[in-house]
Amino acid sequence: MLMKYSAAIIGATGLTGSKLVGLLFENEQYDRVVTLSRKRNKLSHRKHESHIADLFDSATYKEFLKVDHLYICTGTTRDKTPNKDEYYRVEHDLPLQAAEVALSNGVKKVIVISALGADPGSRFMYNKGKGEMERDIEKLGFEEAYFVQPALIGGEREEQRKFESAWKKFQKLIDPLLISFLKKYRTIEPEIIAQSMIYVALNGHKKSRIESDELIEIASL
């Protein structure tokens, strides 16, 4: 008999989060999938529980984060969130707070989307924020905490990101040239990230930080 699990997704409406939700609906090992968002979403499935929540206010969602696995898929850009303090709140404070609440509810496993190059000592704000987020969630003391570190994520977003769209076109041209140790810098599709996150949640992994090329290998399993 298959073990059955419940999952909560923070950031279920994003590019990768939306793919993750769909795959969780299809996965026989999950019988309950919880999503939290600022407004009612259009997802409909027998496994699905949708709750309205302000992710910056833990009181609005604490009672809903009682699951086996927490998936965190949040993120923003400087274009969308130009204020430096607000940017850090989204990139660092929000996922950390959600993880704290889940841990207090007894959640034992968390899987977080970070970024290739995440490093709390980085000179680059994006990499530094992601690195500090990883470090601080790891310090919380989950039984298992995994941080997937994708390179540039392919696919089309609902909102327009002009620089990202232009860079994706350029990246597609150079992807075939990225071989050997440079393979981890190739574009990675959101479905691949989502597949690998589920595999790691269900089967574990030898490393807590999983880079982009490793995610592709894991998804193939």
Image (cartoon, rainbow, N blue to C red):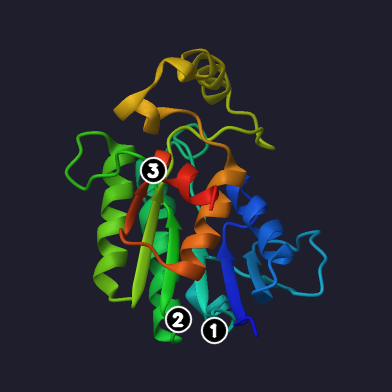
The residue tagged 1 is 66
Q: Secondary structure at mark 2?
A: loop
Rendered location of residue 17, percent (x, y): 60, 53
Rendered location of residue 57, percent (x, y): 50, 71
CA distance separating discs 1 and 2 = 7 Å
Q: Is residue 168 left or right of residue 122?
A: right
Instruction: State the residue at coordinates (53%, 25%).
Output: 164
The residue tagged 2 is 107
Give the residue type that dot 2 points to: Val
Give the residue type that dot 1 points to: Lys
Q: Secondary structure at mark 3?
A: loop
Say few, some or many: other residues with alpha carbon within 10 Å of mark 3 (under 14 / 14 to 19 / 20 or more): many
Mark found first going from the N terminus, 2 or 3 = 2
Q: Secondary structure at mark 1?
A: loop
Observer-nearest of 16 and 202: 202
Give the residue type that dot 3 points to: Ala
The residue tagged 3 is 115
Observer-nearest of 39 and 18: 18
Mark found first going from the N terminus, 3 or 1 = 1
Q: Is residue 166 left or right of residue 21?
A: left
Q: Is residue 136 above or below residue 190?
A: below
Q: Is residue 139 above or below residue 217?
A: below
Residues at discs 1 and 2 in contact (Cβ within 8 Å): yes
CA distance separating discs 3 and 1 = 27 Å
Say few, some or many: other residues with alpha carbon within 10 Å of mark 2 (under 14 / 14 to 19 / 20 or more): many
Q: Where is residue 60, by image quadrant?
A: bottom right
